[in-house]
Amino acid sequence: MAELAALQVLKELVPPELQTPRVGIICGSGLSGLATSLRQIVLVSYDKLPGFVESTVPGHKSILAFGLMGSGAGVPVVAMLGRFHPYEGHKLSSVVFPVRVMAKMGVKDIFITNAAGALNPALAVGTVVVVHDHIALPNLTGMNPLLGPQQDPSLPRFLPLSDTYSRSLRKLVFKAAHELSIERDALAEGTYAWVSGPTYETAAEGRFLRGIGADVVGMSTVPEVVAAREEGMNVLVLSLVTNAVVIPEGYKSVRDEVEAEIAGNPKAEVVDEVVSHEEVLALGKLKGGLVKSLVEKVLDLL
Ligand SMILES: O=P(O)(O)O[C@@H]1C[C@H](O)[C@@H](CO)O1
């Protein structure tokens, strides 16, 4: 099994007391600050680990961090300070490889974070969304991380995903928010749509995804979720809304515009906001603290 080679290296580099983390964490774009509160921290670069590829996206580091997180004695955790996306050119099997390594290390609960665009107009930028379901068009149409011969026949061939997002972990996030006196509107629940990226959505795509029931959209997470469920882990996903996906009600007719100009009544041009990765990272920096305090408190409540 390919994961065993990575495990062997980790055995040499990580002290025994941190070698069996209870919780795995994946940091989304601009969210690697999550790991700044790790104690007894040990960092392992991905290039030392067989099977790990490189995280090439700004805001993602190619580092695995081990340590204790949360108050008191703390919970042993392993955190990916950067993830792999299929749009980087990585195979889906590489994207989910670290999740499989975490499972072999004994991780029971995985907390996956991401930056996402809001499709639901009720979600303000800066809101943390506790994901309760997903829509993965790529999964349904041939880009599923479980396609192909089974690497481990002891895992289920046909994985049910109807109950993917752990109810008890989701409840813990809301309990944590209560204990931290976090404003009600700062935390919401919703459905995550996975798209391959790296393009952001057109307005019509945004309308489509909203129309089929998604609240937020992003370019990651679902492959990791699927692999984690296959490995039997409890999954929690937190999406930080970093931008709103602009979904104008209808087309801005250029015919109307030209006719108004000809009639001598030009209208002021409305310029839609354009999303950028810089904006996504800046918001992560600004609001990453909220994700971090929620994760720390959930660890205390486990
Ligand atoms: O890794 P995540 O899903 O947090 O990163 C999001 C999706 C794209 O990789 C990038 C777009 O800005 O941010």
Image (tube, rainbow, N blue to C red):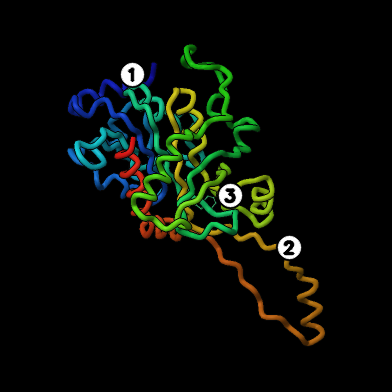
Query: Callout 3: helix, strand or loop?
Result: loop
When the figure is inspected, residue 93 is found, relative to residue 264, above or below; the finding is above
| Residue at image point 39% right, 45% down | 175
Q: Residues within 10 Å of mark 3 (few under 14, many from 20)?
A: many
Q: Which mark is residue 250?
A: 2
Q: Look at label 3 and name its amino acid.
A: Asp
Q: Which mark is residue 128?
A: none
The location of residue 158, given as percent across then percent down, is 58, 19
The location of residue 77, given as percent across then percent down, is 29, 34
Q: Earlier in the sequence, mark 3 or mark 1?
A: 1
183 displayed left or right of 66: right
The location of residue 46, given as percent across then percent down, is 31, 35
Q: Earlier in the sequence, mark 3 or mark 2?
A: 3
| Residue at image point 44% right, 23% down | 231
The residue at which mark 3 appears reads as: 215
**Foreground disc of the pair 3, 1:** 3
> In terms of depth relative to the viewer, which is nearer, 110 or 157?
110
Q: Look at label 2 and name its amino acid.
A: Gly
- Tell me the quarter of the picture where residue 45 sits: top left
> In terms of depth relative to the viewer, which is nearer, 13 or 119?
119
When the figure is inspected, residue 185 is found, relative to residue 60, above or below; the finding is below
The residue at which mark 1 appears reads as: 4
Query: Callout 1: helix, strand or loop?
Result: helix
